[in-house]
């Protein structure tokens, strides 16, 4: 039976790849610089790692197995299956649930619960973004201005959002109603036990201080990476674009792609995105090329790396050597963070145009994600070291201490002495802040504003100004200098800031035993 399943999957994958427009892809990729395309692929890898981290984090809260590389294997297998099944990735989620049970030893109810909670968090962020995207886009594009289309789309999005809000805000009420319900059929009994398990774990998630907000922030960060890739890709073809409309086009295309017509939303996604890009006055040939490349990055490339990872997992005997092979992953991400900071500096020396400033700001955002990932992965796998800590600080100094200043200085024709003092004050304060942090023994909080936050604030100010003004106005220059001084003072101050993504034990061993006993009593009350 297992061999038959592999044969069927192989046939489906061959059919899927047969549908791929290789000639169109080759023609499209020839228009893109190799380095830029590789950078976009790396952003997609970061997206996949963030999704996997989210699964591990939810699994940890539930008290189950949450090994990062085992979970990555589960998600890789799921990505392969969902690529050959139509609609909202149902086939992939069923596969993940089965693998959670077989590989990570979850019960059937716990596996289904983990899949459900992850989808709830991800879908909530996705549909909230789509609500605002469609509200704005429907007033810009004639196709969406029909009252009927507006009603159907808004009703669909709002219904899902409201249902998810009710599920999280009225958990206890729904739980009591389900427990008191009379079961008449076997399948309703299975559904009842499943819902009770889901609700009990949602309660655990809600009781973990701030965890709901952290999960939503993580889901939002994952989704935001998609329009960032789109904007960077479009910029390689034209500088005449509206980044807001591009962001909305990306999310609307994904929402249409969820309609269960073809495997992976093929066809419907491409048609929607290409049409919307043409409506945005992008040349039709460029629009098609952008769509093909974006689809390759976010769909076909994911299938390829998933097949590669699953193959490595099988060759290595169920992943026994995966953890040791990837023990340098946190430091690799740190070096990538550092490389981006150096790249921003070189980019500003080579070209300080408006589009280059925007690209540099987006690169700093990617550095923020890498900086978040490397530390959390190091603590998650117990790979923390003095070398890693020093490398991380140096990377942060380059990407968030030097890079934002380089962007600002590149847009200034003349730097008077008082401006030079303010400009130098920021990296000096950042260096002091990092040195003090390395000597800090309690990592439950930050003493002073982290340099990562300061750098992202400065990048945001530069990015917003690039869309409002074609150059640095005197008013913006004064504002930016005052912001620089304020951030410098905040970095060297001693006020405490709690970590957003703490890597502490949300469930210690005793707590896990209690949680499992509680779930066991819910699922098997006669024991």
Image: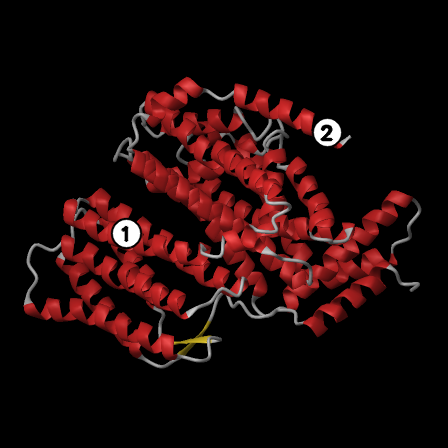
Q: Is residue 487 left or right of residue 291?
A: left
Q: What residue is drawn where x is 46% and y is 27%?
A: 143
Tag 2, which secondary structure? helix
Give coordinates of residue 351: x percent, y percent: 16, 44
Pick whichever of labels 2 and 1 is earlier in the sequence: 2
Q: Looking at the figure, which quarter contains the N terminus?
A: top right
Q: How is the image coloured?
A: secondary structure
Q: What residue is drawn where x is 85% and y is 65%?
A: 521
Q: What residue is drawn where x is 50% and y is 49%?
A: 49
| Mark 2–mark 1 distance (CA, rounded to whole Å) | 53 Å
**Residue 460 versus residue 421: which sits nearer the camera?**
421
Instruction: Tell me where residue 440 sits by quadrant.
Output: bottom left
Question: Crowdedness of circle 1 by 10 Å Cα count: few (<14), some, many (20+)?
Answer: some
Q: Kindly identify which residue carries mark 1.
A: 463
Above or below, 156 relative to 296: below
Name the mark nearer the viewer: 2 or 1.
2
């Amino acid at each position: 039976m297992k061999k038959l399943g592999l044969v069927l999957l192989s046939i489906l994958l061959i059919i899927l790849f047969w549908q791929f427009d290789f000639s169109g892809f080759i023609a499209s990729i020839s228009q893109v610089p190799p380095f830029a395309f590789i950078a976009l692929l790396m952003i997609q890898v970061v997206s996949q790692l963030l999704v996997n981290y989210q699964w591990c984090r939810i699994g940890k809260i539930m008290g189950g197995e949450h090994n990062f590389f085992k979970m990555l294997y589960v998600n890789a297998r799921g990505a392969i299956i969902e690529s050959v099944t139509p609609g909202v990735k149902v086939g992939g989620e069923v596969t993940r649930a089965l693998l959670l049970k077989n590989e990570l030893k979850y019960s059937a109810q716990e596996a289904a619960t983990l899949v459900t909670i992850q989808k709830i968090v991800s879908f909530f962020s996705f549909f909230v973004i789509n609500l605002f995207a469609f509200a704005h886009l429907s007033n810009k594009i004639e196709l969406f201005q029909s009252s009927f289309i507006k009603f159907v789309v808004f009703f669909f999005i709002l219904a899902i959002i409201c249902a998810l809000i009710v599920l999280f805000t009225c958990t206890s009420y729904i739980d009591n109603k389900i427990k008191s319900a009379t079961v008449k059929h076997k399948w309703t009994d299975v559904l009842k036990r499943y819902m009770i398990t889901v609700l009990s774990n949602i309660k655990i998630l809600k009781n973990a201080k701030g965890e709901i907000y952290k999960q939503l922030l993580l889901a939002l960060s994952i989704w935001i990476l998609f329009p960032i890739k789109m904007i960077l890709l479009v910029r390689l073809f034209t500088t005449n674009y509206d980044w807001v409309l591009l962001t909305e086009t990306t999310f609307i295309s994904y929402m249409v792609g969820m309609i269960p017509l073809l495997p992976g939303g093929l066809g419907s996604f491409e048609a929607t995105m290409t049409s919307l890009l043409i409506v945005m006055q992008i040349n039709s040939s460029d629009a098609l090329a952008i769509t093909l490349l974006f689809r390759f990055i976010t769909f076909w490339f994911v299938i390829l790396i998933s097949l590669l990872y699953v193959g490595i997992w099988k060759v290595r005997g169920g992943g026994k050597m995966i953890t040791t092979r990837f023990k340098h992953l946190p430091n690799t991400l740190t070096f990538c963070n550092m490389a981006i900071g150096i790249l921003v500096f070189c980019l500003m020396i080579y070209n300080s145009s408006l589009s280059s400033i925007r690209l540099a700001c987006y690169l700093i955002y990617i550095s923020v994600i890498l900086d978040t990932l490397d530390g959390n992965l190091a603590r998650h796998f117990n790979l923390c070291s003095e070398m890693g800590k020093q490398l991380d600080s140096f990377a942060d100094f380059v990407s968030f201490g030097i890079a934002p200043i380089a962007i600002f200085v590149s847009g200034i024709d003349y730097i008077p002495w008082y401006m030079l003092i303010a400009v130098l004050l920021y990296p000096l304060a950042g260096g002091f802040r990092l040195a003090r942090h390395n000597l800090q023994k309690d990592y439950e909080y930050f003493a002073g504003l982290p340099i990562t936050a300061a750098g992202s604030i400065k990048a945001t100010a530069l990015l917003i100004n690039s869309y409002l003004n074609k150059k640095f106005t005197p008013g913006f220059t004064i504002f930016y200098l005052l912001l620089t001084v304020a951030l410098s003072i905040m970095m060297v101050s001693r006020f405490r800031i709690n970590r957003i993504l703490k890597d502490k034990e949300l469930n210690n061993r005793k707590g896990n035993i209690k949680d499992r006993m509680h779930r066991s009593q819910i699922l098997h009350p006669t024991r």
